[in-house]
Image: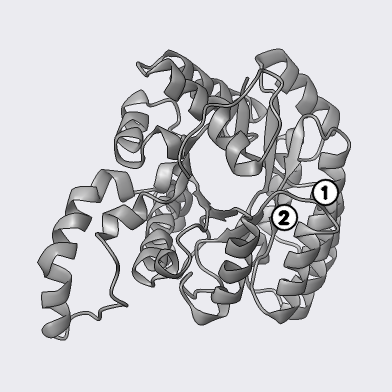
């Protein structure tokens, strides 16, 4: 069995609603890019042909929300969540919907309850920064408290940030800045004490946790002495005291395995996070050939790279099924500590 825990979607009702409020190059690109973003039948046919049993539907293109009035965000978020729920409901055996909260405030917390209750979605998506604010900003804590209480997983997708304007050349804003922003978001959640207060909360990151597994030794080294020393010198500031080592907190994240076909990169992530915290994901339907090539690269990587078979099963479907509380047709999913 194969569960794609990070497959994108952008239903046409949402594209049309956004176009009325904030036309953009991002929306135009969605219309011109892969039809799998909004065509239900074509997506199912692709899944059937290549052996993808279930897709977890994550809204694409976070930049569409940037610069929008808060009242419009409130209204269009409801359109987004209704659209995702309706898309998934056409084939509940093949699709699992995840709602979206582009911002978090009192109105969006009401929407969170609708996502979890009325719409029956299985998780919620937030972005790596919320209108430029870090994910440990006080405005985010009501969401974390409620999600932890409900055992409701939170997906994180990178968002554009206020870096240099020149990073848009050669789409470096997506190629490199997005994994960097994901890494910063993870670090703020760790050092801001979110896991300290809510140790059972579940976050799912994109692109294998960005830089974190590759720079784990540097993170650990700075956590030992350097960050405290820099704070004393006035070159930094310290967050709340953490129980245990920061790297232990970083290992609590769940992470997709999107590597663009690099078994070496996947192995680094597996070594750091452990097989219990890696989910199969593909970024479908982005990339070449109407978005059909990258998922096949990811599937080949996970199915062929050296790995214990029980770990391979966890990555391909078991971890996602456990996280989302999904029944499995192929028998019990591999068990693991949460």
Per the image, the residue denoted by label 1 is: 85
Residue 303 versus residue 262: which sits nearer the camera? Answer: 303
| Residue at image coords 46%, 73% | 136
Above-or-below relation of 214 to 148:
above
> SS for tag 2?
strand
Locate the N terminus and report the quarter of the image it occupies: top right
Q: Is residue 120 visible?
A: yes
Residue 301, given in percent of the width and then of the height, sits at 44, 20
Question: Regarding mark 1 in the picture, which secondary structure is present there?
Answer: helix
In the rendering, at what x and y percent does residue 23 appear?
76, 63
Near-viewer residue (332 or 69): 332
How far is the residue under mark 2 from the one under mark 1? 8 Å
Sequence order check, earlier mark of 2 and 1: 1
| Percent position of residue 306, x then y | 35, 16
**142 or 151: which is nearer to us?**
151
Asked whether disc 2 touches disc 1, contact meaning CB atoms under 8 Å apart, the reply is yes
- Residue beneath the point at 61% across and 55% down: 151
Figure colour scheme:
one colour
- Looking at the image, residue 155 sits to the left or right of residue 186; the answer is right
| Circle 2 residue | 99
Residue 19 appears in view: no
Q: How many marks?
A: 2
- List x then y, in percent, for residue 145: 58, 70
């Amino acid at each position: 069995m194969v569960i794609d825990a990070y497959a994108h979607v952008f239903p046409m009702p949402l594209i049309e609603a956004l176009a009325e409020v904030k036309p953009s190059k991002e929306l135009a690109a969605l219309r011109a890019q892969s039809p799998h973003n909004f065509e239900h039948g074509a997506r199912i046919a692709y899944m059937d042909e290549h052996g993808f049993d279930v897709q977890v539907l994550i809204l694409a293109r976070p930049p569409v929300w940037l610069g929008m009035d808060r009242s419009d965000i409130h209204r269009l978020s409801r359109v987004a969540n209704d659209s995702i729920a309706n898309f998934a409901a056409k084939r509940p055996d093949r699709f699992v919907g995840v709602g979206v909260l582009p911002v978090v405030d009192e109105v969006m917390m009401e929407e969170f309850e609708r996502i979890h209750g009325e719409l029956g979605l299985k998780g919620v998506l937030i972005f790596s920064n919320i209108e430029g604010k870090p994910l440990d900003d006080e405005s985010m804590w009501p969401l974390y408290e409620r999600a932890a209480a409900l055992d409701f997983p939170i997906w994180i997708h990178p968002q554009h940030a206020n870096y240099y304007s020149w990073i848009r050349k050669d789409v470096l804003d997506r190629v490199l800045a997005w994994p960097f922003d994901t890494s910063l978001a993870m670090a703020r959640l760790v050092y801001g004490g979110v896991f300290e207060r809510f140790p059972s909360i579940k976050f799912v990151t994109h692109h294998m946790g960005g830089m974190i597994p590759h720079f784990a030794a540097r993170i650990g080294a700075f956590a030992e002495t350097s960050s405290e020393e820099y704070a004393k010198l006035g070159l930094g500031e310290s967050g709340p005291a953490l129980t245990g080592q920061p790297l232990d907190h970083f290992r609590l994240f769940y992470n997709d395995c999107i590597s663009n076909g690099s078994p070496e990169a996947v192995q680094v992530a597996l070594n750091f996070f452990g097989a219990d915290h890696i989910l199969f994901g593909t970024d479908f339907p982005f990339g070449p050939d109407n978005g059909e090539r990258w998922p096949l690269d990811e599937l080949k990587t996970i199915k062929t790279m050296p790995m214990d078979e029980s770990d391979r099963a966890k990555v391909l479907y078991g971890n996602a099924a456990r996280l989302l509380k999904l029944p499995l047709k192929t028998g019990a999913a591999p068990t693991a500590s949460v």
